[in-house]
Image (tube, rainbow, N blue to C red):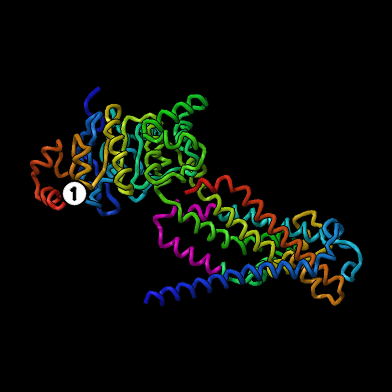
Amino acid sequence: MKNKKRLEEQIFLWIMRVVTGSIILVFFLILLVIVQKGWRALSWDMVSQEPQGGFYFGKGGGILNAIVGSLYLAFGSAFLAVLIGLPVALGMNVHWLRNKRWVNILRFLLDALWGVPSIVFGAFGFALMTYFHWRASLLAGIITVTLFIVPIFIRALDEVLRTIPQGLLEASYSLGATRTRTAFGVFFRQALPGFITALILAFGRGIGDAASVLFTAGYTDHIPQTLQDPTATLPLAIFFQLSSSIPEVKERAYAAAMILTGIILAISVLSRLATRKFKKNIL
Amino acid sequence: MSDTIVTIKGLNVNAGNSPILKNINLEIPRNKITVLLGPSGCGKTTLLKCLNRLTDLYPQLQVSGEVLIDGEDIFHPKQDIIQVRQKMGLLSQKPFPLPMSIYKNITYGLKIKGIKDKKQLQASVERNLRDAGLWDEVKDRLHTPATRLSIGQQQRLCLARGLAVGPEIILADEPTSALDPISSRKIEEKFLGLKNDYTLIVVTHILRQAQRLADHIVFMYFGEVVEQGAPNEIFGNPQSDILKEYLRSGH
């Protein structure tokens, strides 16, 4: 009997090891393939110049338009997502506690929205644009991506806020703190690592998505100057170049993928470093 | 100064249609340990939370009646709630250190009071940690996270944090229920030492703890005060059936 238990334990231990190992392996494999196929095309020109004439047939230039476009789009929509999502998530966990039923219905709806494919958001954004007679633009792209990442941001933050014990707030109030001091000094501080995680999750989905911006942000060889300009994005830059039959252009698609991965990695690492100071203090 | 620090008159608390506290009338003596005794769910914690108006946080609770602290009605609309709360330190069932360092946990309340002078803050941190019996254990790591302390140490930190704002009253809601016997004893010893300078109101359902600590016992059942008096009266000569039964099953 004892041996059987032990064997069972061993089997599960090994299953976990194998599965964990293969996740790490796949992660490195993805990085390896992208780097291996793209590193030759990666150059200073690539990240510092807009595409020149004939770029898509292997001539000179770079994808600065898509890098800047993607950053504008992702930062813009992440900003809007926080603006909309933070009050909703706080409300769900502080102000509307009495209406548990409604909050749970809201949770369910947000989860459903989280599961909706991004192309559907793209189609919705497109329908909105045609209704208002807008052209593909940075603004339309930002709005669409915001709609797409808001449910992700809210629910990810919501899950963190739910774990904050009421007693912590009582402790702060009982020392004479006001609502605002409690909210920022204690509640938000406690939730900050989770807030960053939610933000990165939403940002990553926003910057990496091609389908939602395909019709709404459009594509251009120039860096957008106003919110009305069409905007190139990295996922689409990858998509267009990867579908080319010219090897140099294909290579550039992988280089663009390297850049996109690099941006997301850099932002995750930076925000982790920024919150490390607070994280050690939380309950 | 009168011998009564807290006077409760006709206090009712309802959650929707169900009453939690029914017409509570109490006088709590100054510089004594008053123990609120009773089974779980009888309203002891709610009564405690009325005293520093933590009930404000729960919009589903309707509170009526009067709570006078030093003769002032704390439910009066013009009452400065921050001042009321800083008259009291709170210890909860489980310690909740604030998400910051040990040092900042103590200075949190002081900064709310507007004290900024570093020397003053430092002196207060040391004095209050000593009063809570924690100084020697943490003096070398004041700037490490409070969450790394053991749970017993955390509870004493919460005590020090409460003392730092210079309260008159210490409210303790089953403060030892999450602690091991040794940590519990340390807290109890502190309480007995503190009653020279403070009024303590301690919620417990543990009879032995009540016997060890109490100068005055209030026995509650289903939102009502059933009996109150000195420990020897309550334990030696219980009047009501429910208290008799509670004492029987507790020993």
The kind of residue on which mark 1 rests is Tyr
Return the x and y of residue B37 as percentages of the image width and height. 21, 44
Query: Which residue, given by chain and number where applicable, does mark 1 sit on?
Result: B221
Residue A252 placement, left or right of A85: right
Residue B149 placement, left or right of A273: left
Seen from the viewer's position, the closer of residues A266 and A65 is A266
Placement of the N terminus of chain A among the 4 image quadrants: bottom left
Q: Give the range drawn in magenta.
A: A86-113
Q: Which residue lies furthest to the top in this view?
A: B1
Seen from the viewer's position, the closer of residues B176 and A1 is A1
Residue A141 appears in the figure = yes
Q: Is residue A109 magenta?
A: yes
Main structural element of the magenta stretch: helix, strand or loop? Answer: helix
**How many numbered dots are placed on residues in this image?**
1
Return the x and y of residue A189 as percentages of the image width and height. 52, 46
Q: What residue is at 88 percent from the left and 61 percent from the top?
A: A61
Residue A23 placement, left or right of B48: right
Asked if B161 appears above or below A189 in the picture, the reply is above
Asked if B86 appears above or below A73 in the picture, the reply is above
Circle 1 crowding by C-alpha within 10 Å: few under 14, some 14–19, many from 20: some
Residue A65 placement, left or right of A213: right
Return the x and y of residue A268 as percentages of the image width and height. 65, 56
Asked if B125 appears above or below A75 in the picture, the reply is above
Report the chain holding disc 1: B
Q: Does the magenta stretch include residue A242?
A: no
